[in-house]
Image: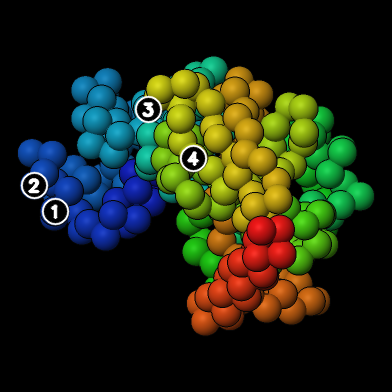
Amino acid sequence: MYFNTNIKILRKRRNRTQDIVAGELGISRSTINSYENGSIRNPTLDALMLFSKYFHISIDTLVKVDLARLSGFQLSELEKGHDVYVTGSRLRVLATTVDSQNRENIEVVPLKAKAGYRNGFADPEYIKKLPAFQLPLLLSDRKYRMFQISGDSMLPIPDKSWVIGEYLENWYDIKDDQAYIILTQDEGIVFKIAVNQLRKKKTLLLKSLNTEYESYEVPVNEVREVWKFCNYMSNELPEQSLVKDELLHKLASLEKEVKGIKSVLE
C-alpha cells in the first residue's frame, strides 16, 4: 500500500503544509502526520474517501500506484483528472520512456520510422527503440516528442526539419489556426495548421502554410494522436518572405502589364 507516501507527494506538489491540509480536511495535523509517516497503516474507508476527494485522485490510485515512480508528466496528467481508474477505457494511454532519473524523454521519430510509428505509436516496446534525448529548456510536467517532416506544404519551415510537439490529451483544447503534429489512421504523421470542428462536425480542418496545398477535413475517429507544435530545428534557413512594399511593387507591375496587354488587344 502506497497511501502514506502518495498523500505526502501530492501535498508537497500543491505546496501545502500539514497544517493547511489538516485545516482544509477538518482533521488534526497529528493525524495527517501519522498517515504520512506510516504510523496509521490501515486508513479507514472514510479517510480514503476524504483524501481521494481532496486530491481528485481515485482510491485505487492512492493505494495501489507508487506515485514516487511516476514522471512529472505522468503526475501532472493524474492531477488533471486523467486517472486510469476513473476514466477507464476513455483514457488514451501514451507509450512513453523516461531516463535514469525518471525524467520524461523526448523520443525522436525520423522519416525512416514514420511508417512504423503509425502502427507502433501505442506499443511501449516500439517506443523504447526510438532515439531519445533531454532538452532542459522544456517543462518537466509535460510530454514532448520530436518528428521529422517532409515536403514543402509547411514552408517556410523547410523540408526535412525536426518539429517538437507537446502531447495533447484533450483534443477539444485544439486552438484554431495553430500548428499541430497529428497522427492519422490513413496518412500517418502530418504537420498542419488546424481548425477545431469537433463539436460541430466531429472533424479537424487541416491547412498548410503553403497556399498551393488545399485544406481538407479529417474525421476525429481517424485521429490517433495530437501534438501541439512548440518549435522546430533545421539545417536550412527559411526562405525569405516578401515584405509589404515588395508585394505592392509586384502588384503594381502586374497591373501595368495587364493594362499594356489590354491596349494592344484594343
Which one is earlier in the sequence, the residue at label 2 or at label 3?
2
Image location of residue 261, percent across then percent down: 70, 64
Quarter occupied by residue 45 = top left
Q: Which residue is mark 2?
A: 23
Residue 241 visible, this orientation = yes
Labelled pair 2, 3 in contact (Cβ < 8 Å): no
Furthest residue in direction front, as rendered: 266
Image location of residue 44, percent across then percent down: 26, 24
Measuring 37% from the left and 27% from the top, which residue is drawn there? 58
- The reply, left or right, for residue 224 in relation to residue 119 is left
Label 3: state its secondary structure. Answer: loop
Q: In 3D space, how far apart are the residues under numbered discs 2 and 3 (Cα atoms)?
A: 22 Å
Label 1: state its secondary structure. Answer: helix
Measuring 42% from the left and 34% from the top, which residue is drawn there? 172
Label 4: state its secondary structure. Answer: strand
Measuring 86% from the left and 52% from the top, which residue is drawn there? 111
Measuring 26% from the left and 60% from the top, which residue is drawn there? 15
Label 2: state its secondary structure. Answer: helix
Establish if 183 lies above or below 186: below
Q: Which residue is mark 1?
A: 20
- Which amino acid does the dot numbered 1 rest on? Ile
Which one is earlier in the sequence, the residue at label 4 or at label 1?
1
Q: In 3D space, how far apart are the residues under numbered discs 4 and 1 (Cα atoms)?
A: 43 Å
Q: Which residue is mark 4?
A: 195
- Which amino acid does the dot numbered 3 rest on? Ser
- Which amino acid does the dot numbered 2 rest on? Gly
Q: In 3D space, how far apart are the residues under numbered discs 2 and 1 (Cα atoms)?
A: 5 Å
Which one is earlier in the sequence, the residue at label 1 or at label 3?
1
Q: Which residue is mark 3?
A: 58
- Which amino acid does the dot numbered 4 rest on? Val
Labelled pair 2, 1 in contact (Cβ < 8 Å): yes
Q: In 3D space, how far apart are the residues under numbered discs 3 and 4 (Cα atoms)?
A: 34 Å
